[in-house]
């Protein structure tokens, strides 16, 4: 089982290629928000960039608060989503300790990292990668 | 394909939204800005008239493809009182796109110093009188606290003291490291009491509706070209400063106000030197994987003991030329120090350096007096140039107020026409020959990037008039299409016209190669018409004597060819303007 990891954000140039790729390839959208990975500066561009994405908690607090089991734990950490079960309560977004779930009001569903790795090849400086999860249960 | 344009009236503090068909609105970027100026511009009124618009435009490919990351600003320039365009990157293009607008028109004048804030769900007018005379960097920091848009992806535009003081060479700073640099857009913001503009947005567009099935594959192909082709990726490596040593070797790099074109001490301000000793890191405009913005580390001791502070200063070829070789300065740290002051004041770096070089030579030649200049300025001595930069932005007397208006104004009021390095506006750093001199002097933006004629100067047939005119015509047509999409001009190798047709097609803007070229001609025609309507006359543009004294690797300048080309290109421009009626 693999998960996404921001392995070296000090090399990030702030191009947003990863966010745009996730939106384009996974969510079929042109967006820098409808993406499982968010890039942001803090205190202006001179301070560098950070990546916000699902850290694959195990157990995931977002799944624990989901009242309809639309979110369930993924093997090795993170979550799986069943859209038909979602009632758009957005409790998952509130429960995420690192703000990695964006609740899309237009689509009425949470947007989060699937750990699929489709963003990885678009990063020009290898700041992100898919890594093997150790000790998979 | 329809686009939303946000119209802001600073006087009434109200906004309205307009829908424009992009074929009628001339694609986007350069074309859209021109068509919006045709609608909202006041041709007869001065640049500082409250109702003159500042028009920010992006295009149909913005954010949809790599390097489609620029914004065009159309406005009436206080520098020459004619229609003008300036381009900038940073995060602004994507911020506008995801705010949901392809155009932002700002007109009117606020009662007091104001900051405009827009997003996909907000239009705010923040009263910011406390920002008066704050420099660009502290303004940026304070605006981050003023803004109600969450941090992380906002774009923050602001002016410094130069813009507030209506200096016609003032720039608009975009996201600290990029600029609408040339032709005085910063002063137009100042005239509107507009200290800052904050843009943010999180709209999402459904690709199932707006894009074809070919789109993801096309994106992938272009991403690979952009990230693996040396011709594009070179902008990341040493960046534009890679050109300092080659141009110096070709005797094409202006030194000491273009008194010479080469100097053996180039190595200390070369791209290689900056990269090895001062490069801190590179950053990118949002939506561009290249990352051409080079940030240098300026470390300064401020106390007797080991007390240091550091600054991060972006550098490029042009600012190194203007504040380095043009002033005879051969220390990279000294260049960064001057450049940082230019940034703080909110001035255009090229104009600043070239104006200071002219004043320095004028002092040498006793055309100006010490009483006028108030400072002793000498080539290769950086110390007093710091104060000179502040004088340009905050003029202490009439001489410095005139200097900030640029060299065309200075020639008229203070003389020195023989040695003023002005080609429409202060020259960019290419003393490559006749084609470049004419192209900048007459070119639409008076920019080295209008036509890239410095490269034609290096061709075998550089003195073939017909070939030069063909090159100018082809380049202007292609470049205006690219800047209407709106692509970065560093993306030229990644986007042929055929590729642009495919990209446009993939996002529902159906066109053919011939149609696109014709659309380009239409945009050229309108842009030139706007120049003529606002007073442009190519016959009146003078190429100062200094340019005829230049000696490059090819030998001396040929004054006859230069004059013939100037006349012929002026005719070509007039024909371009007459091509279509609007």
Image: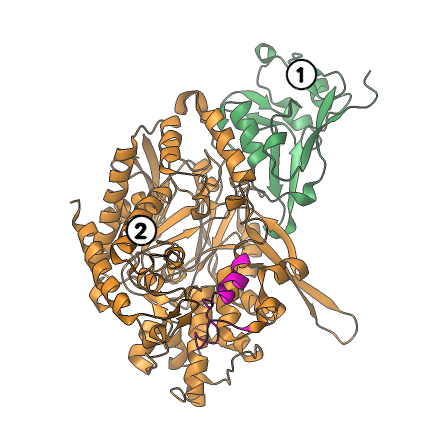
> Residue B337, image x and y in percent?
59, 68
Do badges 1 and 2 share one subunit? no
Badge 1 element: strand
Q: Chain of mark 1?
A: A
Q: Colour of chain B?
A: orange
**Image mark for residue B359:** none
Q: Can the viewer see residue B254?
A: yes
Can you see residue B206?
no
Q: Spot the green chain and give its letter.
A: A
Q: Is residue B552 magenta?
A: no
Q: Mark 2 falls within which chain?
A: B
The residue at 57%/27% (across/down) is A22
The residue singled out by tag 2 in the image is: B471
In the picture of the structure, the residue carrying the numbered disc 1 is A80
Q: Quadrant of residue B369?
A: bottom left
Cα distance in 3D space between marks 1 and 2: 57 Å
Q: In this picture, is B536 found above or below A23? A: below
Residue B103 in the image: x percent, y percent? Answer: 36, 42
Q: Secondary structure at mark 2?
A: helix
Membership of B260 in magenta stretch: yes
Percent across and percent down for residue B421 are 38, 72
């Amino acid at each position: 089982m693999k998960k996404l990891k921001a392995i070296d954000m000090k090399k990030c140039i702030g191009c947003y290629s990863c966010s745009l790729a996730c939106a384009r390839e996974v969510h079929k959208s042109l967006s820098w928000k409808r993406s499982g990975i968010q890039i942001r500066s803090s205190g202006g561009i001179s301070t560098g960039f950070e990546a916000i994405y699902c850290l694959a908690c195990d157990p995931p607090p977002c799944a624990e608060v989901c009242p309809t089991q639309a979110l369930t734990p993924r093997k090795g950490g993170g979550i799986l989503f069943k859209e038909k079960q979602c009632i758009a309560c957005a409790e998952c977004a509130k429960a995420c300790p690192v703000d990695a779930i964006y609740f899309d009001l237009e689509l009425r569903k949470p947007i989060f990292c699937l750990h699929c790795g489709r963003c990885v090849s678009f990063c020009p400086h290898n700041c992100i990668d898919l890594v093997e999860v150790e000790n998979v249960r | 394909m329809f686009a939303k344009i946000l119209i802001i009236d600073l006087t009434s503090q109200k906004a309205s939204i307009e829908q424009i068909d992009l074929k009628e609105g001339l694609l986007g970027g350069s074309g859209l800005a021109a068509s919006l100026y045709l609608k909202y511009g006041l041709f007869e009124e001065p640049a500082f008239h409250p109702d003159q618009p500042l028009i920010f435009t992006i295009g149909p490919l913005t954010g949809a493809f790599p390097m489609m990351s620029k914004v065009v600003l159309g406005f009436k320039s206080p520098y020459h009182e004619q229609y003008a365009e300036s381009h900038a990157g940073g995060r602004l293009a994507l911020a506008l796109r995801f705010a949901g607008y392809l155009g932002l028109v700002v007109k009117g004048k606020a009662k007091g110093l104001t900051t405009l804030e827009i997003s996909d769900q907000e239009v705010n007018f923040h009263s910011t009188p406390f920002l008066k005379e704050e420099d660009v960097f502290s303004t940026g920091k304070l605006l981050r606290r003023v803004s109600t848009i969450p941090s992380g992806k906002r774009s923050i535009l602001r002016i410094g003291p130069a813009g507030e003081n209506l200096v016609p060479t003032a720039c608009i700073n975009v996201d600290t490291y990029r600029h609408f640099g040339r032709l005085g857009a910063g002063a137009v913001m100042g005239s509107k009491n507009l200290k800052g503009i904050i843009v943010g947005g999180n709209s999402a567009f459904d690709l199932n509706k707006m894009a074809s099935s070919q789109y993801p594959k096309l994106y992938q192909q272009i991403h690979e070209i952009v990230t693996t082709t040396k011709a594009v990726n070179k902008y990341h490596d040493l960046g534009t400063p890679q050109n300092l040593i080659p141009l110096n070797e070709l005797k094409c790099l202006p030194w000491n106000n273009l008194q010479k074109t080469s100097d053996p001490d180039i190595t200390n301000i070369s791209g290689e030197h900056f990269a090895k000793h001062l490069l801190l890191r590179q950053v990118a405009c949002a939506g561009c994987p290249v990352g051409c913005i080079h940030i240098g580390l300026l470390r300064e001791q401020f106390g007797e003991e080991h007390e240091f502070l550091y600054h991060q200063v972006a550098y490029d070829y042009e600012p190194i030329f203007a504040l380095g070789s043009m002033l005879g300065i051969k220390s990279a740290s000294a260049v960064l120090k001057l450049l940082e002051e230019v940034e703080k004041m909110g001035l255009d770096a090229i104009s600043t350096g070239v104006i200071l070089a002219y004043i320095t030579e004028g002092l040498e030649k006793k055309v100006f007096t010490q009483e006028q200049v108030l400072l002793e300025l000498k080539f290769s001595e950086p110390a007093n140039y710091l104060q000179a930069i502040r004088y340009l932005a905050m003029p202490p007397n009439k001489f410095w107020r005139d200097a900030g208006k640029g060299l065309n104004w200075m020639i008229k009021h203070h003389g020195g026409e023989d040695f003023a390095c002005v080609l429409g506006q202060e020259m960019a750093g290419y003393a490559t020959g006749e084609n470049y001199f004419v192209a900048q002097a007459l070119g639409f933006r008076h920019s080295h990037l209008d036509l890239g004629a410095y490269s034609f100067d290096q061709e075998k047939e550089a003195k073939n008039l017909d070939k030069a005119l063909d090159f100018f015509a082809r380049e202007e047509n292609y470049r205006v299409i690219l800047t209407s999409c709106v692509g970065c001009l560093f993306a030229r190798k990644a986007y042929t016209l055929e590729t642009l047709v495919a990209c446009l097609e993939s996002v529902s803007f159906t066109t053919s190669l011939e149609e696109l070229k014709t659309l380009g001609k239409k945009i050229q025609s309108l842009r030139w018409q706007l120049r003529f309507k606002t007073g442009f006359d190519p016959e009146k543009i003078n190429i100062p004597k200094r340019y005829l004294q230049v000696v490059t690797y090819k030998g001396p300048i040929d004054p006859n060819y230069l004059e013939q080309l100037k006349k012929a290109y002026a005719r070509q421009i007039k024909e371009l303007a007459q091509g279509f009626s609007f």
